Image: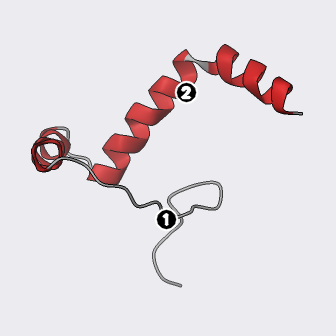
Amino acid sequence: MGQPKKYDEKCKHVSFSLPISVIENLKIISHLKQKNQTQLILELIRKEIESNSDKIEMYRELMK
């Protein structure tokens, strides 16, 4: 019951501070793109992860 799952994996709540102007712009951009703020931030982070996937994998190998 309840809302359907949004993600294929477990999620963890994160809390951080942003300048008020960034928050205001985030609200506007998310409204323009018809996404909620979490979806927009996640999309931007995923794009960054994808563009740096080689570096991320190399870093993971170093941490083993």
Q: Amino acid at mark 1?
A: His
Query: Which corner quadrant of the image does residue 25 belong to?
Result: top left
- Which percent across, then down, holds residue 42? 42, 42
Query: Residue drawn at (35%, 52%), measured in percent from left and top?
Result: 38
**Rendered view: 10 above or below 21:** below
Q: Amino acid at mark 2?
A: Ile
Q: Residue furthest bottom?
A: 1
Q: Which residue is mark 2?
A: 49
First along the sequence among labels 2 and 1: 1
Q: Is residue 2 left or right of residue 11?
A: left
- Real-space CA distance between mark 2 and mark 1, rounded to the nearest whole angstrom: 19 Å
Query: Residue drawn at (84%, 25%), measured in percent from left and top?
Result: 61
Res. 13 mark: 1
Q: Is residue 40 left or right of residue 29?
A: right
Q: Is residue 36 left or right of residue 63?
A: left
- Which percent across, then down, holds residue 46? 49, 33
